[in-house]
Image (tube, rainbow, N blue to C red):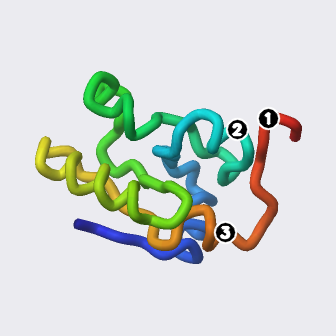
Amino acid sequence: MRTITMQELIEVMKDKADIIDVREAYEYEAGHVPTARNLPMSEFENRIAEVNVGSYIICQSGARSAQVTQWLAANNIDAINVLGGTNAWDGCLASKEN
């Protein structure tokens, strides 16, 4: 499984990276990495077509994103797990309010 640190993700974000937040919608709406889109882990099996090869998978701590990244690999989809998740994000998280 490929992984990336949050600092590395910040560099990649300059090139319009596809970031998928796998937390549930209510968690995502409370605060997420800017430009990340929400695709909850609970819906992944039915929405796998929405995942691009090389997507960066993020959650709050890195545990759920690791599970999803492994599941994607088992389904022949290359994705990258973001270590530390939103807990490792130094900036302000985007939310429904902002």
Of callouts 3 and 2, which one flags the residue occurring earlier in the amino acid sequence?
2
Quick one: 37 or 42, which is closer to the camera? 42
Q: Quadrant of the C terminus?
A: top right
Q: Dot 2: within a 10 Å radius of its alpha carbon, few (fewer than 14), some, or many (20 or more) residues?
A: some
Q: Quadrant of residue 26?
A: top right
Q: CA distance from mark 2 to mark 1?
A: 5 Å
To which residue does mark 1 refer? 96
Q: Position of residue 70 (x, y in %)?
A: 22, 56
What SS does tag 1 mark?
Answer: loop
Asked if labels 3 and 1 touch by Cβ distance under 8 angstroms, the answer is no
What SS does tag 2 mark?
Answer: helix
Q: Quadrant of residue 9?
A: bottom right
Residue drawn at (42%, 72%) of the image: 4
From the viewer's perspective, is the residue at label 3 or at label 2 nearer?
2
Compared with 83, 23 (above or below) is above
Q: Quadrant of residue 86?
A: bottom right
Compared with 49, 51 (above or below) is below
Q: Position of residue 15 (x, y in %)?
A: 57, 55
Q: Dot 1: within a 10 Å radius of its alpha carbon, few (fewer than 14), some, or many (20 or more) residues?
A: few
Compared with 17, 63 (above or below) is below
Residue drawn at (77%, 48%) of the image: 94
Q: Quadrant of the N terminus?
A: bottom left
Side of 29 where 18 appears, left or right: left
Q: Amino acid at mark 1?
A: Lys
**Numbered label attached to residue 66:** none
Residue drawn at (63%, 42%) of the image: 28
Asked if labels 1 and 2 touch by Cβ distance under 8 angstroms, the answer is yes
Q: Dot 3: within a 10 Å radius of its alpha carbon, few (fewer than 14), some, or many (20 or more) residues?
A: some
Quick one: 24 or 35, which is closer to the camera? 24
Residue drawn at (57%, 38%) of the image: 37
**Numbered label attached to residue 89:** 3
To which residue does mark 2 refer? 29
